[in-house]
Amino acid sequence: MASPSSVPPESVETAAAPAPRVPYDLFLAPGKGWFRALRHPDFRLFWTGNFVSNIGTWMQNVAQGWLVLQLTNSPFWLGLVGFAQQFPALVFSLAGGVIADRASRRRLLFVTQTTMMVLAVALAILVSLELVTVRQILVIAFLAGTVMALNAPAYQATIRDLVHREDTLNAIALNSIQFNMSRVVGPSVAGFVIAGVGVAACFYLNALSYVALLFVIWRVRFPARELRETNSFQAELLEGFRYVWTNRSILVLIAIVAMVSMFGLPYLVMMPAFARDVLHVGAAGLGYLVAAAGAGALLGGLHLAVQQAHRRRGPIVLAAAVVFFAALVLFSFSRQPMVSAMLLAVVGGAMVNSVATVNSLIQTVVPDAIRGRVLSMHTMAFLGFTPLGSLLVGGLAEKWGAPVALALSSGFALVLMLIIAFAVPSVRRLH
């Protein structure tokens, strides 16, 4: 579609301004369209491929949790598998950031996505042959988490590479939208597939979804990057730490993301226990609960997509984090499936508005030469602290039950967030 500036000027006799193209202005127009980042063909292709792949990933996540609960009947094992899958982000994300700033991002993404496809196939075969054990799931989860930790910084940096600078916030919001659209579709489909065919089918479908993403990585034109002098691996890692430490606003933002990760996100690991033992809705209900959180996150992404880049974003981060933890506290006390689903929708929307807004601030403020390393710290905070929270909530749930465990964890974080909101005014002033 041609942009307005490419339309030839009218003759003198027909000099009246043409009628505005409302769909274009509303959705794709530079600077104000809701989905303006999709004007860029390579970003559009990358967005689509990741959407397909993420549907498969969410199917696998739901099926894996259900399988662990069937094999062990233990919420502690749910927490332990969650720990195994997410702990590598705490250890390897920073290394992934250094690699993302040094190596070919296309090559790195191709290797990591291929490896995750192989792991999905391995798990599917083990389940099909009825050889699977919870320890095998633990190992595969750890390997998948390691690969994801190495992949995430390059993936995040690629989003900024494929759009103009002024479209960065919109691109991040659209990336969040596709992720959470898949979070609605994937778990819903997984619930029916588990009930009708079995958990192995979810793992096979996830492996198949990676084919689309590998095709996209092969086709997308990654922009040329500036040649820069590289130091030792350790020196570049320390450079990233030094940058964050001397930019205190970014340091506080990353700390907020770490709180969301450690004290809030483990609710996903506990979802099978809530679905079966608290709300009594079974596998199909589990899919709907996770999908409800995804639907809320989708709406949260749409809210971000319409925001203008000049709007002050610090208050959004703080308010969204407070709402996130408050909704989790209320969810832990709910015993009605419909009320629980609505609260999870609020949880999903608030989480996206908080974490994605932090991501957008990093993407627009941090120089390209160090962006991968700073994004790796965002990744480490978002994914790396979740396993610690999963162990905490899993251990508490084993003793007192999932509702009490989640209420204690999210309630503690809610108090901390309120203190930060009032005690650190510099965050409220961030643009």
Image (spheres, grey):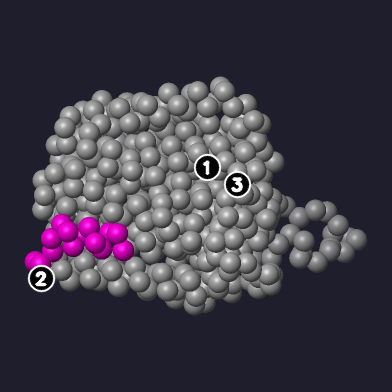
| In magenta stretch: residue 238 | no
| In magenta stretch: residue 131 | yes
- Image position of 208 (left or right of 285): right
Residue assigned mark 2:
129
Query: Is residue 238 visible to the viewer in this orientation of the structure?
Result: yes
Q: Mark 3, residues whose alpha carbon is within 10 Å: few (<14), some, or many (≥20)?
A: some
* Secondary element at tag 3: helix
Alpha carbons under labels 2 and 3: distance apart: 49 Å
Alpha carbons under labels 1 and 2: distance apart: 43 Å
The front one of 173 and 143 is 143
- Image position of 238 (left or right of 382): right
Q: Amino acid at mark 2?
A: Leu
Residue 254 has which mark? 1
Residue assigned mark 3:
244
Which residues make up the magenta segment? 129-143
Q: Residue at x 84, y 59 (%)?
A: 14
Q: Mark 1, residues whose alpha carbon is within 10 Å: few (<14), some, or many (≥20)?
A: many
Q: Quadrant of the N terminus?
A: bottom right
Q: Which badge, 3 or 1, comes first in the chain's sequence? A: 3
Could you say which quadrant of the image residue 306 lies in?
top right
Instruction: Tell me whether the residue at label 3 lies in contact with that at label 1, contact meaning CB atoms closer than 8 angstroms.
Output: yes
| Front disc: 1 or 2 | 1
Q: Is residue 361 above or below residue 146?
A: above
* Secondary element at tag 1: helix
Q: Residue at x 41, y 55 (%)?
A: 91
Among all residues in the image, which is located at the extreme left?
130
Alpha carbons under labels 3 and 1: distance apart: 9 Å
Q: Amino acid at mark 1?
A: Ile
Instruction: Tell me whether the residue at label 2 lies in contact with that at label 3, contact meaning CB atoms closer than 8 angstroms.
Output: no
